[in-house]
Image (cartoon, rainbow, N blue to C red):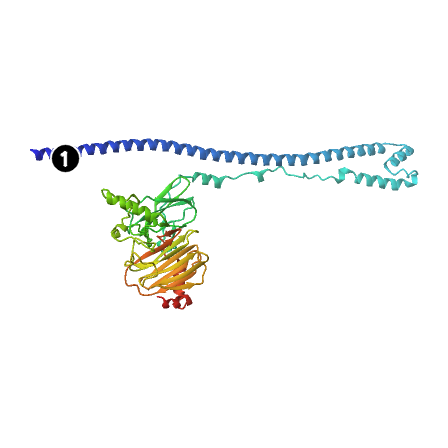
Amino acid sequence: MDGQRETLERIVSTLANKNDEIHNFIDMLNHTIKNIQINSTNAISELDEEFDGLYSILDEMKGSMANTIQQEEARKIQALQDQLSQCSSALESSEELLELAAESLDIKDPVEFLKTIRYFSEPSLGSACHSLAAARQIKDRVTMASAFRISLKPKVSDSMTHLMVDFTLERHMLQAVKFLPVPKAPEIDLAACLVADNCITVSWRMPEEDSRIDHFILEYRKTNFDGLPRVKDEQRWDLIDYIKATEYTLSGLKFDTKYMNIRVQACNKAVAGEYSDPVTLETKAFVFSLDSTSSHLNLKVEDNYVEWDPTGGKGQEKIKGKENKSSGAPSPKRTSISPRSSARSSRDHFTGESYTVLGDTAFESGQHYWEVRAEKDCKSYSVGVTYKNLGKFDQLGKTNSSWCIHITNWLQTTLSAKHNNRTKTLDLPVPDRIGVYCDFDGGLLSFYNANSKELLHTFRTKFTQPLLPGFMIWCGGLTVSTGLQVPSAVKTLQKSENGLNTSTSSLNNIA
């Protein structure tokens, strides 16, 4: 009976859950229908705006072209009117001369006829003996009249066909107007992608030419899983929008995961297309934090920052005394322990003059790189690596299992390399940031000016145990940058060294 009741309860619960799912699905469908209606209205509105804009362009073009025709009409009419005025004036003058000549021919009295002839000719012609010359002058005067000089050909034609417009091509183009197609998914060129110097250059191409592509969107997210992106347990996508080219470089990244997923989509004026097939690029780098559980009590440690605290030890002793008298509650100053450092929580704190803090992650193979920046008021600090067996009273560089460079900023600034309690002074300026490069398998530990990548010093040895990053500080603070790839410049320098550098070869004396 109880079993049947439980079975029935499970069925009822399953049915209720299914009903809730159906209700939610119905709500989603209704919401989708509403969105379709809204988006359809918006699309029609945008279509009206596009055509209104096209109409306004055509109206503007029509007005401009009509104005050109009217100007041409006015120019031609004015030219013909000027010519018509000249013809009218010449005709009037010619008619007057013709009328006077006709009247002269009708005169029968010789004396009166000579007077008329003298009117046509020069005043000096006063006698009948000059009548022949006068007649010649009359002929010349008539010949030179404006009626004989004027052109009887119109200056302009009445044709306006050169201002006609043929919209055949444009009509075909307008008839071919269609809705914008959804862009196809780009294809990421994995062979052209580059991961170097904490930058990722992504290159892609379209499967076919598309002149309507306006821009691209690139999305990326960090992951520790190789292969295709996973739906669950993944970080959100970060987005880079409005990329005009088919290549983009993500710079200034911290590689605190093993891989990064990349995908790209193309966008035209209206819509974004499908995402490209995502690619997964390897972004492994050495990541660690500072281990506060075993650091010197005079050091205040927070993730990747350590600061000298002269009151830390005293304050901790007081807290410890209270803890001994109380119920054993943990100190509020030491409650935050990272998961990676908890494995070494049983280690003793560094004490005495060993103002040391170690990284919480060891490595025993591969090439690794990190950087350290000291505050300006930092008086004395060391940067290096050590085996796990560094004693709580030991200082970096004073044991045969630790290597470091040491900087002192007292009356003068000095830089030196230390190992096995032996010191080599380096005649080099102290940089603002120090880069640490370790090739465990190759037995190399090099220190660089992190800005210029100038080599400061190299230890050559054979590492036989896992290494931990180590730091010593007295007065001031240090910031450690991790998740960095080995810089390309450092790789190039390491290849070119070949053990011939003076600084490197002399290290065997203290290595």
Q: Few, some or many C-alpha atoms within 10 Å of disc 1 (few <14, some 14-19, many ≥20)? A: few
Residue type, numbered disc 1: Arg
Give the position of the C terminus as an image quadrant: bottom left
Query: Residue 375's x, y, as percent?
Result: 42, 51
Q: Is residue 370 left or right of residue 88?
A: left
Residue 340 can be seen, yes or no: no
Q: Nearer the viewer, residue 228 or 397?
A: 397
Residue that appears at 29% across and 31% down: 30
Query: Eyeballing the image, is 14 above or below 435?
Result: above
Tally the numbered discs.
Answer: 1
Query: Residue 200's x, y, as percent?
Result: 38, 52
Residue 37 can be seen, yes or no: yes
SS type, badge 1: helix
Query: Eyeballing the image, is 153 above or below 406?
Result: above
Quarter of the figure with residue 94 = top right
Q: Is residue 510 left or right of residue 26?
A: right
Give the position of the N terminus as an image quadrant: top left
Query: Residue 250's x, y, as percent?
Result: 39, 50
Q: Is residue 297 left or right of residue 325?
A: right
Residue that appears at 86% across and 40% down: 135
Query: Residue 265's x, y, as percent?
Result: 37, 45
Residue that appears at 32% across and 62% down: 399
Q: Nearer the viewer, residue 407 or 46?
A: 407
Quarter of the figure with residue 74 = top right
- Residue receiving disc 1: 10
Q: Nearer the viewer, residue 261 or 347?
A: 347
